[in-house]
Amino acid sequence: MTIVTTPGLERFRGLVSDALLAEIYDLARPLQGLHVLHINTTAQGGGVAALLRVLLPLARELGIPHSWRVVQLDEFAATFMARLTDMLQGGEPGQITAEDQRQFLDSLRSAMQPLAEERADLYYVHDIQLAPLGQLFPHLRPSLWFNHIDTAQPNPAALQYISQFLDAYALCTFNTPFSVFPQLPAERVAVITLGIDPFSERHLPLSEAEGQKLLAGCGIDPDRPLITQVSRFGRWKNPWQVIEIYRLVKQRRPEVQVALVGALEASDDIRAQAILADLQQWAGDDPDIHLLWDPAQLTAPVVNAFQRFSQVILQRSSREGFGLTVTEAMWKYQPVIGTSATGVRYQITHGRDGFIADDAESAAGYTLQLLEERERWRQMGEAAHRSVQARFLLPVMLRDYLAALGRVQRQGGGV
Ligand code: UDP
């Protein structure tokens, strides 16, 4: 089968360069017929699920069969993984005892049972919690590993713990150059730029009237300004600071409202419930603080409406591997008030298409500025949209992804 063009990719003609599309078709050709199996820990919620949902259909159209299986972690493994994430992302102290290690690997072995018979030409394992799979299951060869979290400032002991499993992978991939593990040799490392699919339901154009109707359905007053952060209720997303910023802004603009939009659905995110309860207590009975978590309510068009029609979008992450929510908001003409967390600062150019400020006072200052100077907000939003168009649309991710597969194939893997 020779693929000349595919409809999925041709939709991007005009949005990205012809040279990029040609490069993708060239990279795909030698990979045709190669069966790639992706393994991660959640089908819903979070960036990994979001990117697999858009990447896989395009790769399939290019004649490269793809499948995706989800491994369900038990409670021990999920808790261990959360602690390991704190150590790797936050550089936090912590101990990984021999007993923890043994129990974690046992959990992974049983979690993989339902997949025991699955075979492919190439395996793609996602996230730190699944890093041991390559070593535990020698049939998963050749394989690639994708680290999605922010590992720019890791705890050395945790880094060493994860690194011992990586020899099993032909290629270790990262979503920014800052998160690459320094001890890995260059020939076993690739950076895969993430990108969003502007044609997916979540990002389609939406009229303001329709958007405001959806927001009103969530209890938002369409006649008053709204500040929003769209993110899972995760510790590293720093939702507490969103409320702090809102309270500072409210001193000057009493009519302001805030929304924290974080559907409770990622099955590997075991702490979200407790964080939400803590926030509910902290928010008290302020009717202008909207904590939204019900996945049935937070449909794709509703999240789209929050990203498009909030007056100001915040992303207050203290650690962030990439942060697709930043990309999504910028695509929707929003200058995001972000932080210096790895993936956030990678995407925002301070003062041009957004702001970078770590403390609540400065972020509140920028929020007031954007609320008051709507023409500046509009111009910065245009710049944000253009930046995503040039750097973070799906074809860029597809190009980097296919190049990574090609590198492994040429090392002797696959068909
Ligand atoms: N998201 C969503 N509904 C929500 C909150 C988040 O669909 O209520 C999506 C969001 O649009 C983005 C993804 O979840 O596509 C989050 O990815 P990101 O890289 O920002 O963070 P992660 O959750 O992977 O740490």
Image (cartoon, rainbow, N blue to C red):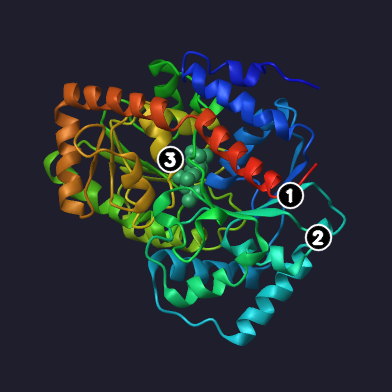
Kindly identify which numbered label has been placed on residue 139: 2
Q: Closer to the camera: disc 2 or disc 3?
A: 2
For residue 311, above or below residue 281: above
Which badge, 2 or 1, is on the more N-terminal residue? 2
- Label 2: how many Cα within 10 Å (few below 14, some 14–19, many 20+): some
Disc nearer the start of the sequence (3/1): 3
Residue 15 percent location from the top left of the image: 46, 17
Q: Which amino acid does the dot numbered 1 rest on? A: Gly
* Residue type pointed to by label 3: Thr
Residue 69: where, in percent of width, then height?
74, 49
Is residue 263 among the parts visible in the rendering?
A: yes
Question: What percent of the width, then of the height, locates residue 87?
Answer: 45, 71
The residue at which mark 1 appears reads as 412
Name the residue rendered at 70%, 26% in the picture. Answer: 62
Per the rendering, the mark at residue 325 is 3
Q: Residues within 10 Å of mark 1 (few under 14, many from 20)?
A: few
Q: Nearer the viewer, residue 230 or 15?
A: 15
Mark 2 or 3, nearer chain start: 2
Indicate yes or no: mark 3 CB to ligand 1 under 8 Å. Answer: yes
Q: Residue furthest right?
A: 117
Pick the front one: 326 or 58: 58
Element assignment for label 1 = loop
Query: Going by the picture, which residue comes out furthest to the left?
Result: 252
Residue 73 left/right relative to 382: right
Q: CA distance from mark 2 to mark 1?
A: 15 Å
